Image (spheres, rainbow, N blue to C red):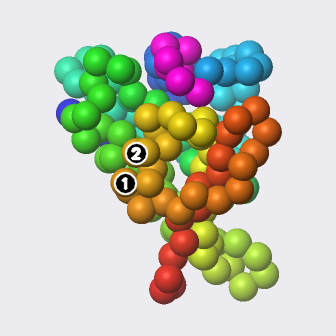
Amino acid sequence: MQIREANFDDIPAMLNIRLEAKENILRTILTESMVYEAMRTRCKAWVAEIGDTIVGFSIANRANKSVWGLFVLSEYHGQGIGRALLEIAANWLWQQRYGLLRRPPKKIWLETKQGSRAEGFYQHMGWQRGESRPHDEVRYWLIRTSI
């Protein structure tokens, strides 16, 4: 497995992986142009490849300090791909600078479906369960104790 920064040509494969998800189903249409604009302005994405096949991706949003998406094809679950993609996205968010003093964030967040397999994964990875959100989702926080 290789992880690399995603480029605009990867967006169709990323969307196919997102649409394949059995949990956390999209409530609204996500288009190539939406992902393109996010990556062009405020987000950075990474893909995991096995051979020439993209099997997972993560995307982080520096504007709101969140992991916007993390998805791995179901046949590749349990192989450490999600862990690697989550870590690279979180590390990138920790490196961003915010505010007048240009400090790194003290906490970052993501949202997932309550009771989903992903929820257990984030708990296992050390993320702290936060508030319930609309549409049966829950916010998770990762808090940095030292900067």
Magenta segment: 18-24
Q: Are marks 1 and 2 in contact (CB under 8 Å)?
A: yes
Work out which residue is located at the far front of the displayed protein and give it. Answer: 115
Circle 2 is placed at which residue position? 121
Q: Secondary structure at mark 2?
A: helix
Q: Is residue 140 above or below residue 53?
A: below
Q: Residue at x 32, y 47 (%)?
A: 84
Is residue 51 one of those drawn in magenta?
no
Which corner quadrant of the image does residue 38 belong to? top right
Quadrant for the N terminus in the image:
top left
Q: Is residue 24 above or below residue 142?
A: above
Real-space Cα distance between discs 1 and 2? Answer: 5 Å
Number of marks in the rendered image: 2
Could you tell me the amino acid type at mark 1?
A: His
Q: Is residue 30 left or right of residue 12?
A: right
Residue 78 in view, yes or no: yes
Circle 1 is placed at which residue position? 124
Q: Secondary structure at mark 1?
A: helix
Q: Nearer the viewer, residue 47 or 23?
A: 23
Image x and y of residue 21, in percent: 50, 19
Could you tell me the amino acid type at mark 2?
A: Phe
Which corner quadrant of the image does residue 40 belong to? top right
Image x and y of residue 33, in percent: 71, 21
